[in-house]
Amino acid sequence: MSPRKSNRKRRSKWTADNILTDPSSPLATADLRSVLTHPLAWTSLTVEERREVLSLFPDVALILDADTDDARPDFESLMNDDAFRADCAAYVDNLAQGRHDPQWLRDAWRAHDRRKAGDFDDFLVRKFEGDWGPLPEHMRLEARTKISSGDEAGSASRCVSAGADEGSPLGNDDSHEKVDGRVAADLGREKSSNTEPSACK
């Protein structure tokens, strides 16, 4: 007698939460752009879900019949939109690198707050001076002014690696690029996924 087959369905290990955060998720290797522009990706949503998705669109020009009950994304335009293509690729890459993991995000935000508070400013000045020579005084004053006024956009010191150890906020990468008119560590291309937060973007 042959063994009896179970009629129970195997439960998927993927839930709505972990498929969006786990680096081994099928989404980490998917062609996300094709998935999102497939007609079923839209028609399977409820009316409320459709409204929520459309409310997140940065450009009304990408919505057909906007402000009507038949409003929908302009999939043809999206397929040719470079920003959409780049964002889909970035999402898949970030997911595969573990950057949507809740612990990674907590660490990245903690590091962001430390950068904002100026915890790494002295280190960054020493690093700059070691690589490029003395930091011009006007840059020191500008950095102090921006920090004291709470302007997040200015200080290159805020874009450091959350995954690096306490004494070296720059991680392992020593390449440099211009940030807001100044030279700062290039943090978007660290070699190790463990040392590459992008919370400062």
Image (tube, rainbow, N blue to C red):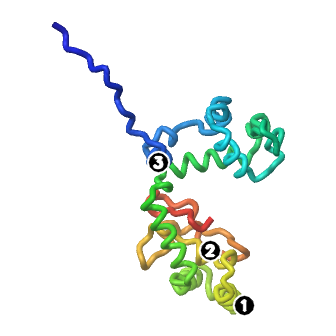
| Numbered disc 2: secondary structure | strand
Residue 138: mark:
1
Q: Is residue 68 left or right of residue 103?
A: right
Q: Is residue 152 above or below residue 10?
A: below
**Residue 101 location (% of width, % of height):** 45, 55
- Cα distance in 3D space between marks 3 and 2: 36 Å
- Residue 143 picture quarter: bottom right
Whether residues under marks 1 and 2 lie with C-beta atoms below 8 angstroms apart, the answer is no
| Type of the residue with mark 1 | His
* Residue at image location 62% in from the left, 32% down from the top: 44
Decide if residue 136 is in sight here.
no
Residue behind mark 2: 184
- Residue 73 picture quarter: top right
**Residue 162 or 130: which is nearer the viewer?**
162
* Residue at image location 48% in from the left, 38% down from the top: 26
Decide if residue 15 is in sight here.
yes
* Residue at image location 70% in from the left, 45% down from the top: 51
- Cα distance in 3D space between marks 1 and 2: 16 Å
| Type of the residue with mark 3 | Asp
Q: Is residue 106 above or below residue 184?
A: above
Q: Which numbered disc flags the more N-terminal residue, 1 or 3?
A: 3
**Residue 90 or 1: which is nearer the viewer?**
1
Q: Is residue 99 above or below residue 1?
A: below
**Residue 189 location (% of width, % of height):** 56, 59
Q: Residues within 10 Å of mark 2 (few under 14, many from 20)?
A: many
| Numbered disc 1: secondary structure | helix
Q: Residues within 10 Å of mark 1 (few under 14, many from 20)?
A: few
* Residue at image location 62% in from the left, 88% down from the top: 134
Residue behind mark 3: 17
**Residue 171 location (% of width, % of height):** 47, 69
Q: Which numbered disc flags the more N-terminal residue, 3 or 2?
A: 3
